[in-house]
Image: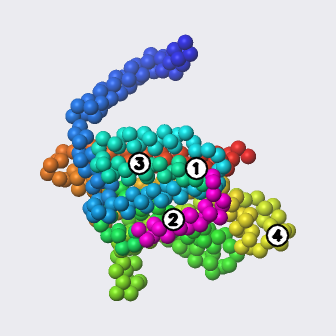
Amino acid sequence: MRALTWLKENLFNGWFNSLLTVVTAWLLFIVAKGVLRWIFEEARWSVVPENMRLLMVGSYPPDQVWRIWTIAAVVLFGAGLLYAHRYRGRVPSWMWVGAVSIFAVSFPVLLPLTRVFLLVTVLSLPVGITVGHLLPPRVVNAAAAFGALAILFLLWGKTSRLGGFSFTLMLTVLASVFAFPLGLLLALGRTGKWPVFRALSILYIELIRGVPLITVLFLSYYMVPLFLPASWEVPTLFSIVVGFSMFAAAYLAEYVRGGIQGVPKGQYEAAWALGLSGTQSARYIILPQAIRSVIPALIGQLIAIFKDTSLVYILGLFDLLFMAITVARNPKYLGTEREVLLFIALVYFVGAALMSYASRRLERAMGLGTR
């Protein structure tokens, strides 16, 4: 009865609204009918599993794909260790369910060896959390540092033919890792009392924010090699990471600056009363509160980096969008542009949704908005 009452009060509370509701419902029915017919009857979804390897790793040598799986497993296992170190609790049931679901859905379209790699990878996160509860903090930090070194070793000199989703994800992670500390320094420089650093920070932030991202990418792509010795062979990935990091750092700096300005003046006075230096005040008092208050904006910028990586398609780099267009232009798969593009849209949506979910979990754990 409540539903009928709501419909009558909001959708059928007059002849005009009733007519508008009926017409809108009819149009939605027509559109939904056509979309569902295309999805279940006309679309050639076989193009996705048949080209899954190309979409995921591009033209990366088959005998070297184990490096990508190992890196993914190391990253997830390390994330599990750090999660267990920060939040003392058992493994959430949704992690086990998610790991099993991903393996079950992907099982029919994967080769036997790939199934083993996938199983080990999806179980790395919950296993890392389980192991993390048994290790002391020092061992967890040492394991995280060792994992970072292992990733660098696995990637060194092996990225020239990497493409697809792996390239997109690697570009996102590297750009985020380098942009965040640079953004912190720019925020501190802009809010600091040193005129020179303040002026340079303002100049950098306003200059980068006033230029389109694609322009920054072109400049980094062509100009970064000019600043290095001619004998050095600069990887294309390095040049693009520099451009993304420079661009994202300017926006992250403004978010952090807003958080710093939101810290009550009494916190500065308390730090001064305790005899803390400027560096100590920023490290232990100001920045923790500032970053905590702008977590949604920071995660939003990371999501923007993840989606903006598709712009490297213009530079001819083998990201996920480039590989999707390559597959659609294959004579064997002509006319499958919609299927392929819809698939990569789903990949981007799932990636952004997972980061948004992690952001909400982090906000809830830190009590953001509750105290």
Which label belongs to residue 35? Answer: none
Which segment did they paint magenta? Answer: 133-154
Q: What separation in Å lies between label 4 and label 3 (alpha carbons)?
A: 53 Å
Residue 185 is situated, as x and y percent measured from the top left of the image, at 60, 71
Amino acid carrying mark 2 in the image: Gly
Which label belongs to residue 272? Answer: 4
The mark nearer the N terminus, 1 or 2, is: 1
- Check disc 2: other Cα within 10 Å, few if <14, some if 14-19, many if 20+: some
Nearer-the-camera pick, 70 or 175? 70
Q: What separation in Å lies between label 1 and label 2 (alpha carbons)?
A: 17 Å
Residue 360 is situated, as x and y percent measured from the top left of the image, at 58, 46
Q: Which residue is mark 3?
A: 119
The mark nearer the N terminus, 4 or 3, is: 3
Mark 2 against mark 4, which lies toward the viewer?
2
- Report the quarter where the N terminus lies: top right
Residue 270 is situated, as x and y percent measured from the top left of the image, at 82, 64
**Tag 2's secondary structure?**
helix
Nearer-the-camera pick, 339 or 108? 108
The mark nearer the N terminus, 1 or 4, is: 1
Q: Identify the residue at the far top of this view.
A: 1
**Tag 3's secondary structure?**
helix
